[in-house]
Image (cartoon, helix red, strand yellow):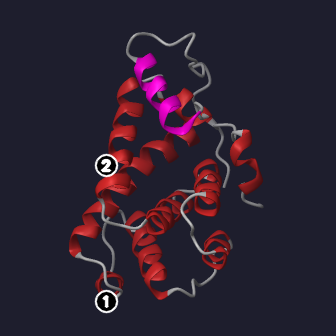
Amino acid sequence: MPTQAYLRTLPAITLQTANNQQKPLLEQALKQVGFIPNMYANMVNVPAVLGTYLHGYGLFRKESGLAPAEQEVAFLAISMANGCDYCAAAHSMIADKVSNVPAAVLQAIRARQPISDSRLSALHALATELVNTQGRPSPETVQAFLHAGFQEQHILWLILAVAVKTLSNFSNHAFGTVLDDRFAAHALNR
């Protein structure tokens, strides 16, 4: 569900145009991912937005206790629930090329079809429901998540994932962020 951009006068920031607050954040991004994604170049217009995103995203990746494939399923579920085509494409590429999400699971998520892996299905359901209910999932969804072998602490980690993805998803809506070439092969077919 592409959104009409409503931030029209803020430019994408480059290393050459960055001020003293923006430049270290863009350099950090360049060091971590090897390039500056269009999303980051937009978000850094308010350094606190990109800084908060990078901090929370990094903590989720390093400390959540979720496997890389589980992290990607969560990020993809949240991005799709928020209607962010940019992040859905980016996390699809990471799921496919980096995090080893099973191809059938990735395809099911992107097609909004049932997920055959029960653990990943429970994770996807809770992450999606956290977004769709504004943090009020049903007891049944929470029980299915816990029954799949996750712990209550993982719910808090998912709340962090929702928070950081909301920063990026909503920023992408605001800017109408153009998909980077690296993610283009994973764009959603709409």
Q: Three-letter amino acid code at disc 1?
A: His
Residue 22 position within the rendered picture, expressed as x and y whole percent measured from the top left: 43, 18
**Residue indicated by mark 1:** 147
Verify whether residue 33 appears in magenta.
Answer: yes
Looking at the rendered image, the disc whose residue lies closer to the viewer, 1 or 2, is 2
Mark 2 Cα shell of 10 Å, populated few (<14), some (14-19), many (≥20): some
Work out whether 65 lies above or below 10: below
In the image, 21 versus 67, the foreground residue is 67
Could you say where residue 41 lies in the image, as x and y percent from the top left?
55, 27
Asked if residue 29 lies in the magenta stretch, the reply is yes
Residue 86 spot, x, y in % from top left: 63, 48
Q: Which mark is residue 179?
A: none
**Residue drawn where x is 64% and y is 45% of the image:** 3
> Residue at coordinates 57% horizontally, 40% vertically from top-left?
172
**Disc 1 + disc 2, Cβ < 8 Å:** no
The image shows residue 39, relative to residue 106, as above or below, that is: above
Of 135 and 85, nearer the camera is 85
**In the rendered view of the protein, which quadrant contains the C terminus?**
bottom right
- The numbered mark, 1 or 2, whose residue comes first in the sequence reads 2
Residue where numbered disc 2 is placed: 59
Q: Is residue 73 left or right of residue 49?
A: right
The residue type indicated by label 2 comes to Leu
- Residue plotted at (24% across, 76% down): 151
Q: Position of residue 175 (x, y in %)?
A: 59, 33
Q: Examine the rendered structure and indicate whether residue 19 appears above or below residue 174.
A: above
Image quadrant where one finds the N terminus: bottom right
SS label for mark 1: helix
The residue segment tinted magenta is 22-34
User: Is 47 situated left or right of 101 in this image?
Assistant: left
Helix, strand or loop status at disc 2: helix
Instruction: Give the CA separation, mark 1 to mark 2.
Output: 25 Å
Could you tell me what secondary structure mostly forms the magenta stretch? helix
